[in-house]
Amino acid sequence: MTDKKQKDFTTHWIFDLYEDGMAVSEIANEVHLTEQQVYVRMRQHPDCYEDIKKIREKMYRTRIRRIRGLSDKITEGYLDRISDKIIACHSDEELDKLYEQIDINTVQKIGKTSSDRVQVAEGKATSIVGTPDGLPFQVLVTRLPEGKTPDDFTDEELEQLPMEER
């Protein structure tokens, strides 16, 4: 095989592996090149590289949706079973035994995760909802005198009011 044909074969092989979702480091190991050489080969064909990046991104989003869908289905089934068991209880003693069996941390995590996803979908929160303190940045709040609103002050007066970090 000539050198040009070998290069073309390797380049097509690289693109095929990349399209299948393999990491560039894994591709480099597979074709016995450095990561930089793999990127150089892919960038020599920018149209093909961009098309494959789009295909790969679409495949990734589809995979994420499937995983979320499966997770939602399992979660919904779990919550339905707990709900059915709670409804079936006829006495406080049965209910107490059931509550001992239920992992409340799991139920709370499900509620928090579901709530976060709804808020992100509705645009009411950032996509980094799960940070320990809630928001991934500091918020400065202007402390107003009692009975006053921001409309009662000029911009210069508002800037002079004390600020509180939250």
Image (cartoon, helix red, strand yellow):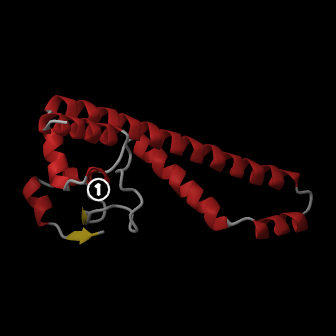
Task: State the residue in front, 60 or 94.
Answer: 60
Could you tell whether 85 is left or right of 123 in the image?
Answer: right
Quarter where residue 16 is shown: top left
Residue 85, image quadrant: bottom right
Q: State the residue position of label 1.
A: 29
Rendered residue at 26%/70% (across/down): 165
Out of 157 and 49, give the one closest to the viewer.
49
Residue at 62%, 67% in the rendered image: 105
Amino acid at the residue labelled 1: Asn
- The part of the image, by quadrant, that contains residue 52 is top left
Q: Position of residue 53 (x, y in %)?
A: 27, 37
Indicate the secondary structure of the residue bearing disc 1: helix
Instruction: Please state the horizontal and vertical placement of residue 23, each as a whole percent of the image.
Output: 32, 51
Residue 145's place in the image compared with 153, above or below, is below
**Residue 11 seen from this side:** yes
Query: Which residue: 29% across, 56% down?
Result: 29
Q: Nearer the viewer, residue 14 or 46?
A: 14
Q: Residue at x 62, y 63 (%)?
A: 106
